[in-house]
Image (cartoon, rainbow, N blue to C red):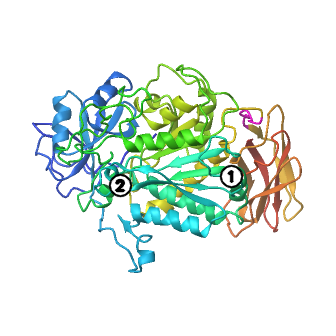
Amino acid sequence: MKSTRRSLVTLAIAGATAAAVISGGAPGSAGPAPGAAVAQAGPTYVYKVRAPLGDTAQDLLKRGFDVLEQREGDHLFVLGDADTGAKLKADGFTAVIDEVLPAPQWEPPARKSQSVDAAALEETYYGGYRTVNAQYAHLDAVASQHANLATVVDYGDSWKKTQGAGGYDLRAICITKKNAGDCALSTSAPKPRFFVMGQLHAREITTGDVAYRWIDHLTQGYGTDAEVTALLDTTEVWVVPIANPDGVNIVQQGGNSPRYQRKNANTTNGSGCSGTSASHVGIDLNRNTDSHWGGDGTSANPCDQTYKGPSANSEVETRALQALWRNLYKDRRGTGVTDAAPDDTTGLVVSMHSYSNLVLFPWGWTTQYKTGNDAPLREMAREMARLAGGWQYGQPGEVLYNAAGATDDWVYDDLGVASYVWEIGPGSGACSGFLPAYSCQSSTFWPKVKSMLLYSAKKASNPYGGANQPLPCPKATNDGDVAIPDGGAAVSSTITVSGCSGNAAPATVVEVHVKHTYRGDLALDLVAPDGSVYRLKSSSNDSADDIDATYTVDVSSEPRNGAWQLRAQDVFSADSGYIDSWSLTL
């Protein structure tokens, strides 16, 4: 995870309340001396709390604090106000104010056009995030414009809709090159299924935007993008962009005091919650399933952010998702904690959350046991984390804290389907937090998560290592020098791979080190054993010395075993150099 965190202020908690007033200090400044003043009620703070893995971390969650999905060594992070700081101190926790969250530049949901047809599609909030209406209008537009690919499915109603208090339908979209039997609510589907959902926790608004972009990437790329076309020819992709629409509606109406609504909008229990950052109505839909319901990481207090609900599967949103999954996937696993799903089990489910740059997989309720499919789950998580640029991965209790009743545990527990949680977004910096600037979506999140989604969707056909599943192939290196003629013919350095099974990874890594006095002269190619050529670098006007670079290339159509070549050519004159070394991770 991260090694440093941008801190607007770091102060010991002192006195009867939180710590110190933040009054005009520059980012990173020390602020007033500990105990010099009292934090105001208005700001929202992130507290850094000492809570090592194990009992201390679980005690912090049991006490109802809004613990973020974020860990730094022995410390967890808690969202709250001044009263939160006082309660942390009273409960015996060592904590400091790590950050003061700025209020986002909020405007009411707005649209550019007054056209009835365009109005819903254009509704945005917090600078560009789509409202529930906009997300749902988008699903309808996609299904209309790409009728050969997309089908919208209404899989239930939100809590408010069941109460006649407004609310929303619960909606999914199935995307594939449609043939007979595709997108049917049947476990006998002809294609494997990849399922991804966003905004189960309403305030995690990045995840809804990623889902929106993923839908467009698939439907707009079919027929023009070879990778997307191949995927949709062979796989059903299911997307629920907003799994908690009642909660999202609260967030999108938040005003300049942001509504950090995490839960659904069920007011049956806890209708008197204060509405402050750590006291909201609703049930945590990621603690409500009957997979070890009520265990670690849950709260029995209706106003707490991790309130488990009055009973397992009590929420209509929970039951609707479970019914949908049971209509999409066969039950392939026994009931024992360590029972494994068979190697030929298909399907993969991802629940997107934010933030902290984590890839998590079952079991979330405990670290005492591993699942019967731990090895392939862990290997896929490792690859997802690598594609994201080096995220941390593991069971929740290994890298964060235990969390019972979660949807990913339920999917694996009940059906045996490979399931993951992605915590998208850094723990610090300009794009951290639940409500990052909308510009972060295109600059930071989407480029990383797109690769993870494509990899995961391809894995849905065979996640657990059946007959066609390649085993991990170790990194191979050739460190022999090969001179590159000045302005001459191409030369090659060879790595021969043997003992690996199946095809190469869709994100094969080629690490190249070339010594050269003008690297812009050089063109580099990866040549597969069958002679197929994959361009790594073209010549350019870059006058700097040497190449020390890592390239990611999709060679998934190529068998791993055989003689791979790095081919280098100096296409201009007057400079010289040589291949120093290169490595290949297939």
Q: Going 21% across and 55% down the picture, which residue do you hit?
A: 25
Disc on res. 551? 1
Query: Could you say where residue 138 lies in the image, as x and y percent from the top left?
Result: 49, 65
Left or right, 172 with respect to 119, comes to: right
Left or right, 519 with respect to 487, comes to: left
Between residues 294 and 521, which one lies in front from this camera angle?
294
Number of marks drawn: 2
Q: In the structure shown, which secondary structural element does the residue marked by tag 2 occupy?
A: helix
Q: Is residue 97 above or below residue 112?
A: above
Q: In the structure shown, which secondary structural element does the residue marked by tag 1 occupy?
A: strand
Query: Could you say where residue 502 lies in the image, as x and y percent from the top left?
Result: 79, 38
N-term mark: 1 or 2:
2
Left or right, 292 with respect to 457, comes to: left
Q: Which residues are magenta?
A: 468-475
Disc on res. 40? none
Quarter assignment of residue 147: bottom right
Tell me the residue that label 2 is attached to: 248
- Tell me if residue 473 is in the magenta stretch: yes
**Is residue 358 visible to us here?**
no
